[in-house]
Image: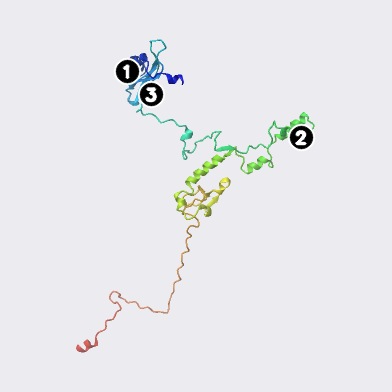
Amino acid sequence: MSAATTRSRTPDRLCAEAVDFARGAAVEAAGDAAVGEHLGVDVDGERVVTHYFATREWAYRGWRWAVTVTRASRSRQVTLDETVLLPGPDALTAPQWVPWSERLRPGDMGPGDLLPTDEDDLRLEPGWTGADEPAPNSALADERLAAATGDGSDSAGAVATEELAAPITRGSISAVAMELGFGRARVLSRLGLHLAADRWEKDYGAHTPMAQAAPASCSSCGFLVPIAGSLSQTFGICANEFGPADGHIVALDYGCGGHSEAAVMPTPPQPPPPVLDEFTVESFPLHPDRDSGSVVESDPAEDLGHS
């Protein structure tokens, strides 16, 4: 058991009784108007006690003055250790500081902002180094230098060294690597690829509500633009200006209502050409409201009775 655990938590009597001495230290630090009533003591160690006093500053509600006093062994004189203003249990304090790299969120960058990347960022790994030649101290480098110098003279050695340090020609491996896009100092690591795939799958993947209600997946859509690289078997780019993912990386199993083959609009029917009949005469009544076209026939018997 350590010595720290065997110490008594009972405060030292002389240090605990030095309330006026501790208050005087707090008043000397902040002024008489800023120091309030005595709130209690706390044991910090052997013959080390902290006195707490309320603060009367309106800007520090819930804070308290902490005055730590101590005394030497076999001494009855109490001395001052430190005086600080500390937050109490109900004090209003600032949130814990978080580094900017952890506070940054997608979309925070604006025009002119720079986002430096750590040298040991796990999302990146070294790309093509461009080193066509072996290491200077390797055995292969010594053999090439000896073969280039021939007789081993100093002049020949200088010429060989210049040839080895000559700029990269178009037919060298580095030039071909530059043409293939391998000239970057760092490229995405496997972890970086997986993190990017998880983000894209979360926003435009098969488990989104849009994809669940889609008539078909993006893999069969004519608006899908293929991408290169190892992610080409899983993702593509949407090129449908009316789709919700236009210009975004989408999973091949994503889908939306803008699928190119979702609902092909039928061709509207063409009406028949008008028929013009110039040989038939149609009669139209002059007053259709008064002449309904019906004829009322009279009864012959009634006609004879009136005659």
The local secondary structure at tag 1 comes to: helix
Amino acid under label 3? Leu
Residue 232 position (above or below residue 284): above
Identify the disc placed on residue 32.
Answer: 1
CA gap, disc 2 to disc 3?
76 Å
Query: Of label 2 and label 3, which has the lower sequence position?
Result: 3
The local secondary structure at tag 2 comes to: helix
Front: mark 3 or 1: 3
Residue assigned mark 2: 147
Amino acid under label 1? Asp
Q: Is residue 307 visible?
A: no
Residue assigned mark 3: 86
Amino acid under label 2? Ala
CA gap, disc 2 to disc 1?
90 Å
Question: Is 86 left, or right, of 188 in this rendering?
Answer: left
Q: Is residue 200 visible?
A: yes
Looking at the image, how many numbered discs can be counted on the residues? 3
Residue 51 position (above or below residue 260): above
Location of residue 111 in the rendering, given as x and y in whole percent from the top left corner: 49, 38
For the residues bearing labels 2 and 1, Cβ distance under 8 angstroms: no
The local secondary structure at tag 3 comes to: strand
